[in-house]
Amino acid sequence: MKRDEQLPGKGDPEKQWKSIYRLGAVTAIIGLVGITVDVVIGILTGGDLSALPQTAVERFAEFSGNPMLGLYHLDLLNAMVQLILIPAFFALYAAHRHTEQAFGLLALIVFLVGSVLLVANNSALPMLELNNRFLGAVDDSQKALYAAAGEAMLATGAHGSPGIFFGFFIPNLANLMISMVMFRGGIFTKTNSWLGIIGSCLMMIYVVMVNFGTAAETMATAFAMPGGILLMVWMIMYTNKLLKLSR
């Protein structure tokens, strides 16, 4: 048998790209499910950032009572969704590789950089490990040591802290960039593009206010709610288009 006959995808690049569109659509659907779960949990738990545990010891107490809630409050779900959406973003770039390749590639690179920052700075699993060591400490000096390590971890990775700012801001900037590529590329509808542009801008305002505003949580929510809804509709629309492109 010839070598080309053993590789059914070889010699048919368009078929391979269609597989990328399909993979992107599937991961976008999974990401939407994760985002929906995040929203539901946020509503059920009140969604008040000021009510979150403020110190490492308080975080450890939360982990002891409800480990899953402790991980959620430290953005583990957000980090997982961010990784899941990488193929979806690559599929958006692939859809524009003939029309807006340069700017599409730039948006993809920015998204990947933001994803790396978000995941690398996420403190959920390290804080869970510190919690286990804190609970197993035999004297106060050891507990104080783990509490101090927890405070340092929260300074770089707690939700709403300046240390995690770029991890949330840069992916939203990438969403804005790819939405502008979609607007210029003519493959996705203008409505789809505008939803991404407006939603991304609102979410970037929210991230700035939460990380650097003083007592701005309530006002920031006024940007986060419509921004999040617009981006979810944006994702639903581009997922549908990716499925059509895959066929």
Image (cartoon, grey):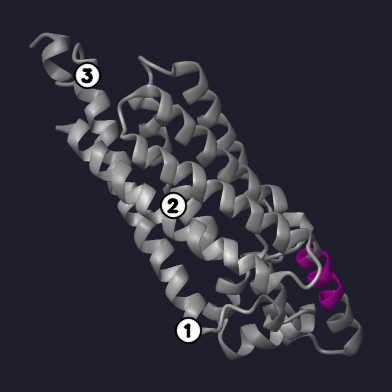
Q: As displayed, is residue 96 above or below residue 236?
A: above
Badge nearest the viewer, 1 or 2: 2
Q: Quadrant of residue 209?
A: bottom right
Query: Does label 1 or label 2 sit earlier along the sequence?
Result: 1
* Mark 3: few/some/many CA within 10 Å (<14, 14-19, 20+): few
| Residue labelled with disc 1 | 44
Residue 232 image offset from top left, x and y in percent? 39, 55
Residue at position x 53%, y 39% from top? Answer: 176
| Residue labelled with disc 3 | 14
Q: As displayed, is residue 129 above or below residue 97?
A: below
The quarter of the picture where the N terminus appears is: top left
Residue at position x 35%, y 14% from top? Answer: 98
Disc 2 marks a residue whose amino acid type is: Leu
CB contact under 8 Å: marks 1 and 2: no
**In the figure, is residue 237 to the left or right of 210?**
left
SS at mark 1? helix
Residue ranking furthest to the right: 141
Residue at position x 47%, y 84% from top? Answer: 44
Magenta range is 146-154
Residue 231's disc is 2
Q: Main secondary structure of the magenta part?
A: helix
Magenta run includes residue 151: yes
Residue 50 image offset from top left, x and y in percent? 71, 79
* Mark 1: few/some/many CA within 10 Å (<14, 14-19, 20+): few
